[in-house]
Image (cartoon, rainbow, N blue to C red):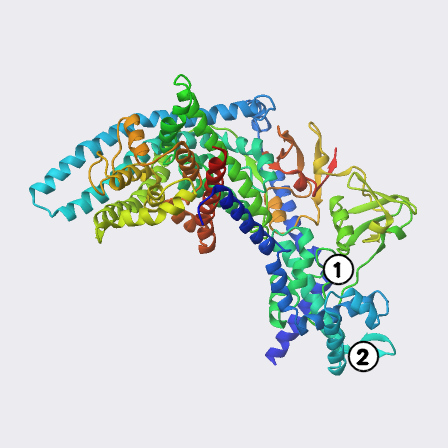
């Protein structure tokens, strides 16, 4: 009996729903909104003079104007990047001196005094400690400068205007204007850039921003680019122009990264991601004086420290692996030497070499240690003088000495160019991969975002290498 | 073989060429072969039923020859399947003409129901572009079973119409009526509302999309002759060839409601003009529509341009004291009345 009643009611409700029609739900929602608006206008008093006060409007007129909008934007971005790269040099070298040149020998003598076996001290101090120290020295200062500056701009309310100005460019590639911000954030750190995509509330555009963030050169890769450009690109022009040439080369790589970002965004939105829901809206909040100390504090804690902690967690095992592969022997060759031998052929095809490929494999946890690893492995396989022993990463103070080691390892201008390209186009570091997983909660997209750039890198370096060899 | 950069390059291009031919979206050989494997008896049966249903609705008669022409399958297979269907009592012959039995019609309605529900789903819950809805629904209509269909319908709130304005048959096979006539049949100066946009054939549908004609828009015919039909809608003028216009169904509005005057799309608002929002077009669906409502784009709100974009779009609009940037295609779906 009861069942019959329920069925009857259900049927009646379906019947009524049918009669009311499709518009009902929309009309109801709109009615509620309109009523709410009416109540607000009846009861809430607004000081008309305070609405959108004049200063705000004036600033907006200038920063979004046809004439000044873009120059202001580039100027601010360039200043932030310049301050980060130049300003980070001093604390970085200070940290490097402290952690690498002072503490490392002290630790070594310390463990020698307590008679620790060589393999344990090598594993712990030359492997784990050195990798962690390196990551801290290279990573911490730029992040501690970049993130607070970025957060201040964000807090002030300028960044939404950048998204506003640039949206049309991003729209053409199927992306959201706010991707300009996450991309810029990626120049500091890709993992932080991926987290920053939370500001994009449209699912499709957010995925695009996450997957393409890796095309922003992060601060773990800037030093590599600058070093290689100085050694190899700067050398092919007259010495007066060498610093200019190497600077231009790095900028070209960064711009190339943006081109890849746009291209990949476009391709993704037309193929794999076309089914994802896409919406757009962009609020331009009023400007407000940044809360300076609070901003500094939160950006240091929320962004810098979290990213740094994750990097350390991943770098420690990487250091261990680097030490182990150079010190465990199979037959009369170390694992590293075997691996380099087996990858040399493929590396040659890409205009690179086995050392570089192995370095990029073991340095997945942190791009910062690519150059020290390459130097160590080069010394290991060529048997030339220099370095600090098998499995001990090192860097040289002199750019020329670094160049000599690399040239002894068989590097040419092609190797250098392709290394710069590969440094731009390869898998994200493991911190970023982990962050992508945390943000997307999808194994599929994480794997895709990790593999796609490497494949692109292989294709691009391969093409460059073949054409180079045909032309020269 | 000795390494040679030219050979390596040629080999690379050959491999990528082959991969492209095999896997390019939609037309890649791999996908075509994969789809062909799936064209089994069930799909042929269902497509025949659907065709017969549509022909029956438009009052046309079908013989086997026409059926072979309209369907994209192997002819022998179709004839084989038609035979089986007569045995299974889904269709019967009246001399030459094929007809649906009651059971056949019910089956056809189920397929149409899934097709239109799926289009509705694609429109409301995904980001696929309009051009793709039809083909995707064509595939899906053979995949969903009875229970899945009902779950989908409940999830969508048992909608009455698909995004093109076609009625969705109910669980019990009831079909709502589409009000209105084909646009070319409307006399000059008549006012009506667009209730249906036909999505086949594809070429004509793409033209309609390119014109930015929206479902649910009010229109007024200003010119109607053998060469073209001109109508005003939402402050803009549209000119269509009669063959294109025939794909639009318009429900005439008898009562002289005060409409049209000053109604325009937000995208046509100029700097320093203010306007009052009169509603959001039916074309703004799902998530996008909800966002707009959330941000305060509701009937009766005052709106004006806050900032002009240096690159043309999006412009920022000042609404309820907040500055919100909208792209042109969004602004075109918000209807306003200029002061």
Question: Viewer-nearest of labels 1 and 2?
Answer: 2
Residue density around tag 1, few if under 14, some if 14–19, many if 20 or more, within 10 Å: some
Q: Nearer the viewer, residue A279 or A357?
A: A357
| Residue B334, picture quadrant | top right
Describe residue B217's horizontal placement relative to residue A93 as left or right. right
For mark 1, what is the residue? B166
Query: Which residue, as the protein is rendered here, is positioned at the far front?
Result: B1
Q: Is residue B53 above or below residue B302?
A: below
In percent of the image, x 43 and y 23: which residue is there?
Answer: A245
Quadrant of image for the N terminus of chain A: bottom right
Image coordinates of residue B318 in percent, x first then y, are 62, 33
Numbered tag placed on residue A192 in the rendering:
none
**Whole-percent x, y for residue B228 in the image:** 88, 44
Q: Earlier in the sequence, mark 1 or mark 2?
A: 2
At x 76%, y 56%, the residue is B200
Quickly name the residue at label 2: B92
Q: Are marks 1 and 2 on the same chain?
A: yes
């Amino acid at each position: 009996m009861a069942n019959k009643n329920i069925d009857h009611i259900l049927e009646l409700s379906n019947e009524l729903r049918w009669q009311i029609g499709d518009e009902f739900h929309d009309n109801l929602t709109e009615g509620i909104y309109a009523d709410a608006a009416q109540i607000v206008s009846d009861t809430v008093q607004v000081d008309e003079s305070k609405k959108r006060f004049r200063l705000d409007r004036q600033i907006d007129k200038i920063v979004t104007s046809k004439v000044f909008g873009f120059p202001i934007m580039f100027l601010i971005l360039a200043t932030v990047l310049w301050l980060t790269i130049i300003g980070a040099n001093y604390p970085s070298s200070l940290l490097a001196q402290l952690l690498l040149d002072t503490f490392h020998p002290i630790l070594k003598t310390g463990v020698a005094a307590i008679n620790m076996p060589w393999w344990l001290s090598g594993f712990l101090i030359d492997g784990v400690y050195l990798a962690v120290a390196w990551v801290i020295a290279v990573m911490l200062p730029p992040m501690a400068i970049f993130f607070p500056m970025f957060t201040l701009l964000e807090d002030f309310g300028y960044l939404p205007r950048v998204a506003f100005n640039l949206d049309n460019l991003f729209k053409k590639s199927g992306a959201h204007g706010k991707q300009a911000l996450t991309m810029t954030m990626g120049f500091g750190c890709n993992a932080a850039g991926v987290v920053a995509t939370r500001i994009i509330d449209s699912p499709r555009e957010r995925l695009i921003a996450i997957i393409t963030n890796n095309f922003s050169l992060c601060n773990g890769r800037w030093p590599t680019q600058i070093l290689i450009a100085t050694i190899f690109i700067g050398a092919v022009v007259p010495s007066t122009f060498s610093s200019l040439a190497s600077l231009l080369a790095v900028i070209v790589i960064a711009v190339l990264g943006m081109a890849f970002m746009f291209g990949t965004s476009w391709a993704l939105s037309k193929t794999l991601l076309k089914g994802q829901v896409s919406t757009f809206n962009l609020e331009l909040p009023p400007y407000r004086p940044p809360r300076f100390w609070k901003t500094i504090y939160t950006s240091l804690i929320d962004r810098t420290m979290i990213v740094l902690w994750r990097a350390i967690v991943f770098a420690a095992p990487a250091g261990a692996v680097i030490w182990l592969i150079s010190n465990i022997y199979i037959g009369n060759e170390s694992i590293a030497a075997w691996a380099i031998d087996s990858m040399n052929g493929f590396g040659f095809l890409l205009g690179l070499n086995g050392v570089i490929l192995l370095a990029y494999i073991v340095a997945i946890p942190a791009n910062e240690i690519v150059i020290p690893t390459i130097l160590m492995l080069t010394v290991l396989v060529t048997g030339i003088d220099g370095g600090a022993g098998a499995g001990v990463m090192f860097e040289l103070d002199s750019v020329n000495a670094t160049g000599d080691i690399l040239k002894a390892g068989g590097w040419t201008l092609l190797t250098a160019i392709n290394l710069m390209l590969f440094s731009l186009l390869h898998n994200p570091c493991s911190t970023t991969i982990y962050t992508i997983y945390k943000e997307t909660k999808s194994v599929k997209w994480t794997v895709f975002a990790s593999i796609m750039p490497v494949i692109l890198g292989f294709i691009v370096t391969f093409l460059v290498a073949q054409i180079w060899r045909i032309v020269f | 073989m000795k390494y040679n950069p030219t050979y390596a390059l040629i080999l690379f291009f050959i491999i990528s060429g082959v991969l492209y031919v095999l896997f390019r979206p939609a037309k890649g050989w791999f996908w075509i072969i994969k789809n062909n494997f799936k064209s089994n008896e069930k799909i042929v049966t269902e497509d025949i039923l659907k065709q017969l249903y549509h022909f029956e609705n438009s009052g046309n008669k079908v013989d086997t020859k026409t059926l072979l022409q309209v369907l994209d399958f192997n002819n022998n297979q179709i004839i084989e399947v038609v035979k089986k269907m007569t045995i299974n009592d889904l269709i019967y012959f009246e001399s030459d003409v094929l007809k649906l039995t009651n059971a056949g019609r019910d089956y056809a309605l189920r397929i149409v129901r899934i097709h239109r529900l799926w289009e509705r789903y694609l429109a409301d819950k995904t980001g696929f572009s309009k051009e793709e809805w039809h083909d995707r629904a064509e595939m899906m209509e053979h995949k969903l079973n009875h229970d899945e269909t009902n779950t989908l319908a409940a999830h969508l709130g048992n909608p009455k119409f698909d995004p093109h304005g076609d009625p969705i048959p109910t669980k019990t096979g009831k079909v709502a009526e589409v009000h209105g006539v084909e646009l070319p049949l409307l006399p000059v100066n008549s006012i009506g509302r667009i209730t249906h946009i036909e999505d086949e054939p594809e070429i004509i549908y793409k033209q309609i999309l390119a014109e930015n004609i929206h479902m649910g828009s009010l229109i007024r015919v200003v010119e109607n002759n053998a060469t073209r039909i001109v109508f005003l809608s939402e402050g803009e003028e549209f000119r269509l060839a009669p063959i294109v216009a025939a794909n639009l169904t318009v429900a005439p509005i008898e009562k002289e409601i005060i409409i049209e005057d000053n109604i325009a799309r937000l995208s046509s608002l100029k700097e320093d003009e203010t306007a009052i929002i009169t509603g959001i077009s039916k074309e703004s669906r799902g998530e996008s529509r909800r966002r707009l409502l959330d941000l305060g784009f509701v009937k009766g709100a005052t709106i004006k341009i806050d900032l002009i974009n240096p690159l043309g779009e999006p412009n920022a609009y000042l609404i309820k004291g907040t500055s919100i940037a909208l792209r042109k295609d969004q602004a075109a779906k918000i209807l306003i009345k200029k002061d």
